[in-house]
Image: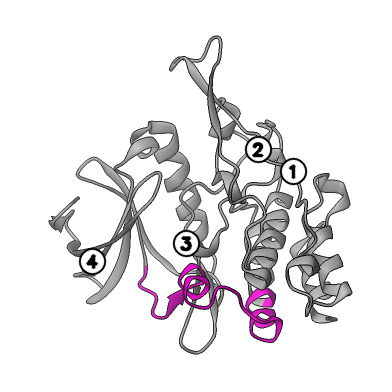
Amino acid sequence: MLRGRFGDRYKIIDSIGAGGVGHVYSALDRELKKKLALKVLVDGFGVRKDIQENFLKASEAGRKIKHPNIIPVYDVGRAGGYAFCAMELCTGKSLRTLLEEKHMISWEEAKPIFLQLCDALSALHGNSITHRNLKPSKVFISPAGDAILLDFAIAKVSEDDFSKRNIFVGTHSYAAPEQVLGMEEYDHRVDIYTLGLLMYYTLTGIHPFEDEKPTLIPVLGNEGGYGVYFTRPLCPQIAPRTLCASLSHPLQDVIMRAMEAEPDMRFQTASELRSAIEKL
């Protein structure tokens, strides 16, 4: 936990939350004279130099994107030995909170959210950024109903990526098969898969891989002595309509195509997925 003054520009007000690589605070920006969200890499993997460098590079790339469905980034840098990113402090609720309250969301309510997320991903992918950590806590819904995509902490922005160093990158239960299998080479289509997974979860109230847990196993040559072995299926074992009969067959087809285990069988771009959603 950090408190008080942070660098020359910020005063930390309160803790908002913590993740696998850092902590998020509300902070007063003395320069802009407004409250912002300040993500600081201080925990776990966040202390690694390569992860900090990727975070700064990805956050700076995100800073250059001006899009209504992507969180605005105002400042990126280091202070007190910590890498940080200052972003808009969103009002409203995360998709995670909405699902906790409602269990599931109707297609009528969810459709505009996913159309906007497709737009956000199109903007990211068009700027050579792969988010690779989409999940309900990374999607914010404003009081006006705008969907805002958050957080570039572990986004992929170059071919020289730290995931090639035997590091699993992402959130296990939301990761695409390429990530789960530890493939060195994967692209923006991991985000297509995960967006399909979010649709499945949002519309049925059931996470297809919720009960699957990673297992630590010894790995020869690994500095720590252990690696992570994933046992979860690569695609859903139960079709969405089995869980929610009100979903149409075409909607189910869109979800299942987005979640194909083989990347070449998925929608190839976010705009292609958007076009399919628009027709539903």
Q: Is residue 110 at all visible to an observer of this figure?
A: yes
**Extent of the magenta region:** 88-115
- Residue at x 38%, y 32% (from the top left corner): 49
Q: Is mark 1 on a helix, strand or loop?
A: loop
Q: Is mark 2 on a helix, strand or loop?
A: helix
Magenta stretch: dominant SS?
helix
- Amino acid under disc 3: Arg
- Amino acid under disc 4: Ala
Residue ID for mark 2:
180
- Amino acid under disc 2: Val
- Residue at x 51%, y 15% (from the top left corner): 222
Give the mark nearer the N terminus: 1 vs 3: 3
Q: Is residue 267 at all visible to an observer of this figure?
A: no
Q: Which mark is residue 63?
A: 3
Give the mark nearer the N terminus: 2 vs 1: 2
Residue ID for mark 1:
234
Q: Residue 41: name its quadrant.
A: top left
Q: Residue 271: name its quadrant.
A: bottom right
Q: What element carries label 4?
A: strand
Left or right of 113? Residue 94 is left
Q: Residue 27 carries which label?
A: 4
